[in-house]
Image (cartoon, coloured by chain):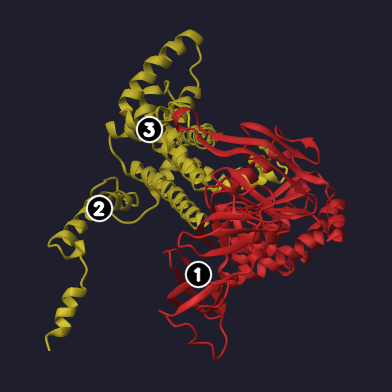
Amino acid sequence: MSEAATVDTANTTTAVDIRGVSKIFGAGSDAFTALDDVSVAIRENEFFTLLGPSGCGKTTLLRLIAGFEHATRGTVLLYGEDISDQPPYERPVNTVFQSYALFPHLTVAQNVSFGLEMLGREKSEIREAVDRMLKLVRMEPMRNRRTEQISGGQQQRVALARALAPRPKVLLLDEPLSALDLKLRKEMQGELKRLQHETGITFIFVTHDQEEALTMSDRVAVMNEGRILQVGSPREIYDRPGDRFVASFIGEMNFLVSKIESVESDRVRVVFPGGAAAFAERPKDFEPAGEVTLAVRPEYVRIENAGTPDTLPATVTEKVYFGTDTHYHLRLHDGAELVSRLQNARGREDTHPVGDRVGVRWATGSAQILKG
Amino acid sequence: MAEPAAQARRGRRFSVKNLPGVTGMAMLCFVLLYAPIVTLVTYSFNAGESIALWEGFSWRWYAAAWENDTVQEAAVRSFVVALFASAISTTLATMAALGTTRTGPFPGRTAIYVLINQPLMVPEIVTAVALLIFFASIKVATGYSGLAYLIAAHSAFCVPFAYLPIRARLEGMDPTLELAAADLYASDWMAFSRVTLPLLTPGIVAGAMLAFVISLDDVVITEFVKSAGQDTLPTYMLGQLRRAISPEVNAISTALLAITVVLLTAFFLLSRKRRVDGE
């Protein structure tokens, strides 16, 4: 733990610093607040993901960093330098667009060399960089093709090579995988991680796909309605969601209304409306009191035989088969519903049929009291 | 088994071809459109002096037109005017198209569309009379009576013809491409010259060709604006028709027709390529 903390502090150079940024489109009664006082620091060399539903402001934030939009309030710093008023062509930041936006009148190689040419680099340097980039994304054999003559996945690679060729300080990726089919998307996820590793460039990745965010990112910022709700590693975001939106947007979550009965040193005891009691982890950043929401992931909910000590009595109302696992829909005696997810195994098909009375429990550490 | 017949009836989709008389009417329209042109072209090869009595095949009227100094002068004048007019109007139209598609919405944009397309809506004879009066006072004031008046007038009424294909091309272009250029360190001018302009070229060429053909064919405005001795091919032909009609006019018409058809075919092919590109 202490070792991890050391590594963490060693690499805290901030690449992009967003400070109090608001973006309001339109004016008067038509005004729309796309970003509402957003502050976040993105570290050098990390794979940082902006995750949220459509319209949450994640793409607007990306466009502000690229320079396609300008903040109504606040500043954008790149390695300490205020770039808020710089046009896109002066910012050492490149973008991979959702539609790729490859130049249709140029070949694959000409697309990749475009940025370096605009920077006025030497011809020999450009040639070398283009060769290196095409090799990096495995598109060398296609260098003289027109961009409409190559497949979607290949266009994606060219777009990556084009944006990486000028060696930007930060690479911005605007839902770059959303146009690909599932298999190709999985492949490109790995490819992106590899590219980030090999180039050592800070990646800022925008997606609405929580799985993409969890599997690829070093850190994730969850956004909703123009605000950043939580920033953390995928594990922190998943295991310790900061609020109800984050908890429900990422993965599945059971929410149970309950009342705080007592607060101990590292756990709290809650009582459900039906009178049953259970334990949850004690929150670190606030003091819980009164009526609260207890959150527990379906995979942490265990089903025991009815009457097992320290379990909540419940009834199985529905079973849904998902191949790798089965979802048991359960109803507590006070009417509250929750889901338990159990991994399937041969010979366990008939346990707990619908209508069965069971006992439900979870480890104290896997249940969490939500703020507010 | 009545089933196949029933199926056939159900399967037959509505088609105007099935309405009585539609096919015949269409044929008649084509005959009315093309019979006069076919006659015109045919008699341009007549060996005799008549435009209604066939006396055998000959190139004599083409030769006569070719050797006629007045025709030569008019032809050169037509081409000079059309070249200048298409160049000027295409430049203006390109700027207008950029101004109306590459800026945010601004008050009065619709009014600007209307103003740009004015020559398509105002009757040509009205424009012609207006130009006649306007230029007459300038001629008096400056003493200049050269080709510039014709070029200016043609440039003006060719703008909307050049504007439409260029604007269509700009609107079909993905605006993200220009963002991508800016993102890759291209200044506004470099983004325009390296990305927008190359992608716009087919539209500009199509617009220029359309403007050229429109200028080449114009009679009404030219007739009103031209100074003495400034006949273009169409106004020369109009003048000839007032006297004795000879197949020489047919020959000139056929040549003009050939040029127009070639240019319009090229325009059509370029427009079609645009649609393929857009996908």
Q: Quadrant of residue A318?
A: bottom left
Residue A130 left/right relative to B112: right
Q: Comparing marks 3 and 1, which lies closer to the viewer?
A: 1
Residue A153 left/right relative to A92: left
Q: Which chain is red?
A: A
**Viewer-nearest residue: B72 or B138:** B138
The numbered mark, 2 or 3, whose residue comes first in the sequence reads 2
Q: Residues within 10 Å of mark 2 (few under 14, many from 20)?
A: few
Are tags 3 and 1 found on a single chain?
A: no
Q: Secondary structure at mark 3?
A: helix
Distance CA(mark 2)–CA(mark 3): 24 Å
The chain to which mark 1 is attached is A
Distance CA(mark 3)–CA(mark 1): 91 Å
Q: Which chain is yellow?
A: B
Say which mark, if any, is on residue B171: none
The chain to which mark 3 is attached is B
Say which mark, if any, is on residue A339: 1
Which residue bears the numbered disc 2? B35
Q: Amino acid at mark 1?
A: Val
Residue A104 shows in this picture: no
Residue B70 left/right relative to A248: left
Residue found at the very far top of the displayed protein: B141
Which residue bears the numbered disc 3? B236
Q: Taking B153 as reference, is A90 above or below it?
A: below
